[in-house]
Image: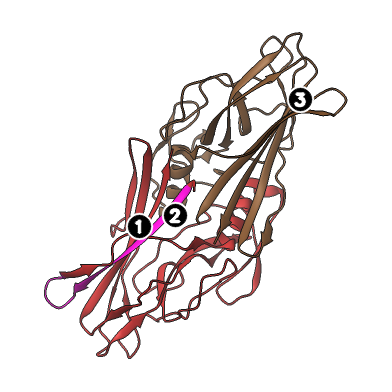
Amino acid sequence: MNVDLWYNMSLVDKSGKVVRSGGRKQSRSYVQGFLATLFSHMSQDAAFLALSVDGTLVAPRYQWTFRMYTPTPGQATYGLVVGTGTLGVTVSDSALGSQIAHGTQAGQLVYSPSPIGSVNVNGSIAYFRVSRSWLNNTVATISIHEIGGCGYGSVVGGAHPFLHFRDLETLHVGVGQTATLVYEERVSL
Amino acid sequence: MNLDLKYKVAKFDAKTGRRTLGSMGWRKSESFLANFINILWEMRVTAASSIVCKDLDGVNKAVSDYLSNFDVTALVGEYIGGIIVGTGVGAVTLQDYNLTVIAHGGGAGQLDYGAQLVATPAFSHPVYSGSSGYFRFWRTFVNDSGGTIVVGEIGVVGLGRVVTTATPFLVIRDVPSPSVSLNDGQGMTVTYQVGITV
């Protein structure tokens, strides 16, 4: 076994009660942004360029290009993200089809911080989890159809996030409800 | 699996223009190691914390996110970086932190380690086709020792940053079966392929 990616998405109501748990599912895939970032780090090829979330070709070589942790509520540029796109996942995906913005206006969700748990090593398995939640503080239900994770990319000349993984998952988030997503990256023998 | 790791070993005759002596074909790598997931965690978290990894001497070191962790490049003769080989045959465990390393050189029991750099070249850019994508990196080893050398294990050493000091950590280990026997004058190229498939 090499590196596996799993996720679990659930829905919580105003009282904190879980009203839907999607169960643990294996992610469809890492995508090109992750492979490109890993290649850049391993090879130190400063001339190599990859497509960032904003559609810019940049060299994802320098520090923080894997970063998903964010302690800041409302920071929707990197970490776990959700969207409304429904097109199938491809290895060349560089962004969600249509990311849901942070906020309380129509069609927006309130992004929580994106914490990362510590590494757990249990015999032949080692893993850690990245999580995030989204509160619907609008006046209408919002439907999530795609989920993913973006690594923050600090490169020469600026910062560009790279999409590292993407999955299709539908969850209807009612008014006052919170969608919670946990991704787990693991190695196992 | 989501991030797929494979490797292959191809032998050649180093004395007669590198005539191919056969390849063992692609094999599934046994594993990225705990050091890999630890360093990945560190880079996911970044400046918020650091994580302890075992260096090549088995000493715990706190790795921080600082420029290009996972650097697997290596200079000619360098065997604390890039793909390395050893004589151990013990089963792979997640906690492995080194090999019984075959040193660089032309003396008894030694192999000549080639460079593993973009300029060598020893890396191929990611390529995408249909539902998959991959990149490769490789390194060449030549037996100029005068005797036969048996390679029992293969590893990859990546640099992690202990504060700002580049420190080597074993991040991948494989034990090919059967072991690879290199006669004097023979060489081998070890290639790893890191891939994703939707």
Say if B99 sits above or below A89 in the image: below
Q: Identify which residue, A35 or A177, lies in the foreground.
A: A177
The residue labelled by disc 3 is: A178
> Any mark on residue B149, and which?
none
Quadrant for the C terminus of chain A, please. Answer: bottom right
Q: Which chain is red?
A: B
Assign a secondary structure to mark 3.
Answer: strand
Q: Locate residue B8, reporting x and y percent.
A: 32, 63
Q: Of circles 1 and 2, which is in front?
A: 1
Say if A5 sits above or below B59 in the image: above
Q: Mark 2 — on which chain does it sit?
A: A
**Residue B146 seen in this snapshot:** yes
Which image quadrant for residue A154?
Answer: top right
Q: Identify which residue, B13 or B64, lies in the foreground.
A: B13
> Any mark on residue B137, and which?
1
Which image quadrant for residue B148?
Answer: bottom left
Pointer 1 with pointer 2, Cβ within 8 A: yes
Say if A12 sits above or below B96 in the image: above
The residue labelled by disc 2 is: A42
Give the amino acid at mark 3.
Thr
Give the amino acid at mark 2.
Met
Is residue B86 shown left or right of residue B76? right
* 3D distance between C-alphas at marks 1 and 2: 9 Å
Please give the range of residues in magenta: B3-19
